[in-house]
Amino acid sequence: MRNLRLIYDIALRELTILRQNRIYLFCMVLFPLLVMFFFTTLMSDGLPTEMPIGIVDADNTTTSRSIVRRLDAFQMSRVVARYPSVAEARKAMQQGEIYAFLYIPEGTTDRLLASRQPKISYYYSYTTLASGALLMKDMKTISTLGSAAVGQATMRAKGYTDSQIQTYLQPIRIDLHQIANPWTSYNAYLSTMIVPGMLMLFIFLISAYSLGTELKFNTSAKWLGMADNNITVALLGKFLPQTLIWLAITYGYEYYVFYVLQFPHQGGPLMMVLLGLIQVLAAQGFGIFAFGLLPSLRMSMSVCSLWAVLSFSMVGTAYPIMGMDGALQSLSWLFPLRHYYMLYQICVFNGYPLIEAWFHFAALAAFMLLPWLVVRKIKNAMLTYVYIP
C-alpha cells in the first residue's frame, strides 16, 4: 500500500509538470491530433484521381480522338494538354506539368484497319511511384481497348457473333477479388502505418525527454526521494499519467479510423484495444531504454528520432521485407513499428486470431520490458550524473 501511495504522489507531481511545460501539450496532444487528421484527410478519396496527362496525337483521326476521350473518362486520368511533338510533352513532364503522356503516331488508324499492329507509346514518370503506376495502368488499358474496338468492328463486318468476338478478344476473363480492402484505398493502407508510426515517434521522444529533464533541471534527487530511492516506483509514478494520455490518443485514433472513417477491420474491438495498449507500452519501453543506454537528454532523443524515422522504411509497407537483403530482414525485427504493423495486418485487418501473430506480440512485450535491463543505470545517472548541454 505504501508503494501505491508513493506512485500516486509521483503521478500527481508529473501531472503538474505536464501542465506547466507546454512541450508536453504540443507533443502529446496537439501534434498527434494534427498528424492524425492531416494524413487521413490527405488521402480521403482512397486513390489519387484526375491526375494530369498529356496527348501527342499525330494521327488525328476519329479513332485516335475516341481513344483520347476514353482515356479522359477514366477516374484517375485527366487530359489537360495536347502537344505537337514528343519532345515538348517530355519537357512538360520533366517540369511537373503532367505525370504522363500518350503518343499516337501518324498512320495508327490505317495500320489498325489493315491489321498491321501499329505501335502506341506511353510515357510516365516514376518520380512519384503511385501516380506513375496508376497512370501506366490506365494508358495500358486504353491501348488495349483501342485495338479491341477496331477488331470488334472488323469481326462484326465479317459476320461473327458477339460471343465469338468476346472469346477472340478476351479469351481469359479475370475474376478479381481483393481481400479486406476491395476499394484499393491508399488511405487504409498508408494511414494505418504512418499515423501509428508518428505516435510512436512522439512517445519515444517524450519518454526520453521526461527523464532527461530531471537531470537538466536538477530535480532527479527530489524525484527519487519521493519514491524512497526505489527507481521502479519512481518510473511507474512518472509514466503512469503519460501512459493514460497516450492510451486516450491511441484509442481515439482507432475509433476515428475504424468506426468513423470505416477503415477495413475484420478483427474485433478487443483486439484493437489490446493492440493500442501494447503499442503504447512498447514505445514507452523503448524510449526509457534509450535513455538508460545513453543517459543524456540530447543523445537519447537523437537515438529515438533515428530509430523512429528508420522504422518507416523497415515496416514493410512501401517495400516488402522479404525483398530486402538478409541483413536488413534481420534488422527489421528490432523496430517496434514493424511488429505493430504485422499485428495490425494479421489480427485487425485480416481478422486472424492472435496465435497467428504470437511472435510479433511477444516482440512488443519484449520492447515493453526493455527498461528492466537499464533500470539500475537510470538510477545511478539520476543520483550521480551532471547534466551536460
Image (tube, rainbow, N blue to C red):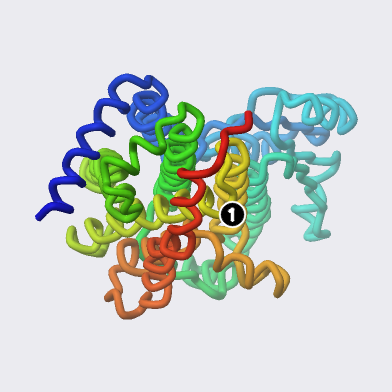
Q: Which residue is mark 1?
A: 318
- Residue 86: percent from left, percent from top: 86, 33
Q: Amino acid at mark 1?
A: Ala
Q: Is 127 rendered above or below residue 42?
A: below
Q: Which residue is situated farthest in the right direction here? A: 87
- Residue 148: percent from left, percent from top: 62, 57
Q: Secondary structure at mark 1?
A: loop
Q: Is residue 141 left or right of residue 96?
A: left
Residue placed most toward the observer, 148 or 81: 81
The local crowd at label 1, few if under 14, some if 14 to 19, many if 20 or more residues have their Cα within 10 Å, is: few
- Residue 235: percent from left, percent from top: 33, 49
Q: Is residue 287 left or right of residue 104?
A: left
Residue 182 visible, this angle: yes
Q: Which residue is situated farthest in the left direction here? A: 1
Residue placed most toward the observer, 48 or 122: 48
Residue shown at the point (32%, 59%) measured from the top left: 278
* Quadrant (top left/top right/bottom left/bottom right) for the C terminus: top right
* Quadrant (top left/top right/bottom left/bottom right) for the N terminus: bottom left
- Residue 60: percent from left, percent from top: 76, 32
Residue shown at the point (29%, 74%) measured from the top left: 354
Q: Is 217 rendered above or below residue 223?
A: above
